[in-house]
Amino acid sequence: MTAYIRDADEIYRQSFSIIRAEADLTRIPPDLEKLAVRAAHACGMPGIVDDLHFSVGAGTAGRAALAQGAAILCDSAIVAEGVTRSRLPANNRVVFEPRTDPATTPQAATVAGWRPHLGGAVVAIGTDATGLFRLLELLDEGAPRPALVLAFPFGFVGAAEAKQMLVDDPRGVPYVTLAGRRGGTAIAAAAINALATERE
């Protein structure tokens, strides 16, 4: 029988060690280093660290918001289920309220329902780009400003463009995103888990 590591903590420890050896973390600020490592771990690609884009102080803003009890708004059930509740510093509310609208995608409809919860929240987007586009529209319409946007939509239509709009947004909402077509629910949840506690 093949020998393999059975201890989950040891698997994590070795995985993070390999990522730190293979990824170039020199451009990643200390407040986002654990997020970068966990994002790479979530997709098995240390190279994505090179394509992470972020605003100055984004990690600090996200950690502070979570420590103060900020709600976590998720664009899908998978992102919400991927948040490790035991890591949350203030028993934070994880919000996923699915909505439908025949005029748009389920993700955009779900994000449209966030308006009452947006102020000071941590937003995690991990499915298609329509949710991120809708979030930017809500902000254009005067919706309350979130504390941090973790934007990891993926796909061939709109994902790269929506993320670039976030990076270029003149309001200066704190953000972390992954340039281009790559992204996904696992990365979005990993980003939340990385910010939730100093424990790696």
Image: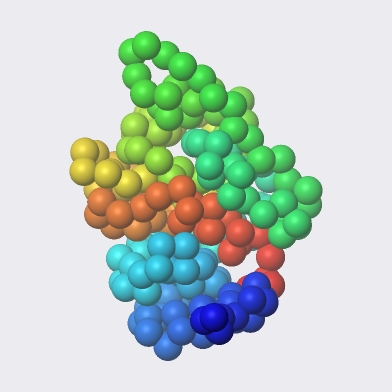
Query: Left or right of 21: which side holds 2?
Result: right
**Residue 7, image quadrant:** bottom right
The quarter of the displayed image where residue 126 is located: top left
Question: Which residue is located at x 49 percent, y 36 percent?
Answer: 75
6 up-or-down from 51: above or below: below
Q: Is residue 83 above or below residue 45?
A: above
Residue visible at 46% across and 56% down in the picture: 187
Could you tell me residue 77's position as x and y percent? Answer: 55, 36
Q: Residue at x 36, y 53 (%)?
A: 183
Task: Say how the picture is coloured.
Answer: rainbow
Q: Position of residue 59 (x, y in %)?
A: 54, 63
Could you tell me if residue 165 is visible in this image? no
Name the quadrant of the C terminus: bottom right
Instruction: Give 142 or 160, whichever is nearer the viewer.
Output: 160
Q: Quadrant of the N terminus?
A: bottom right
In percent of width and height, residue 190 lies at: 53, 58
* Residue drawn where x is 36% and y is 45% of the image: 153
Q: Is residue 180 among what the camera can see?
A: yes
The outermost residue toward the front is: 1
Q: Looking at the picture, tell me which residue is in the foreground, 85 or 113.
A: 85
- In the rendered image, residue 18, in percent from the top left (x then y), is placed at 46, 84
Task: Give the total number of marks visible in the rendering.
Answer: 0
Which residue is at the far right? 91
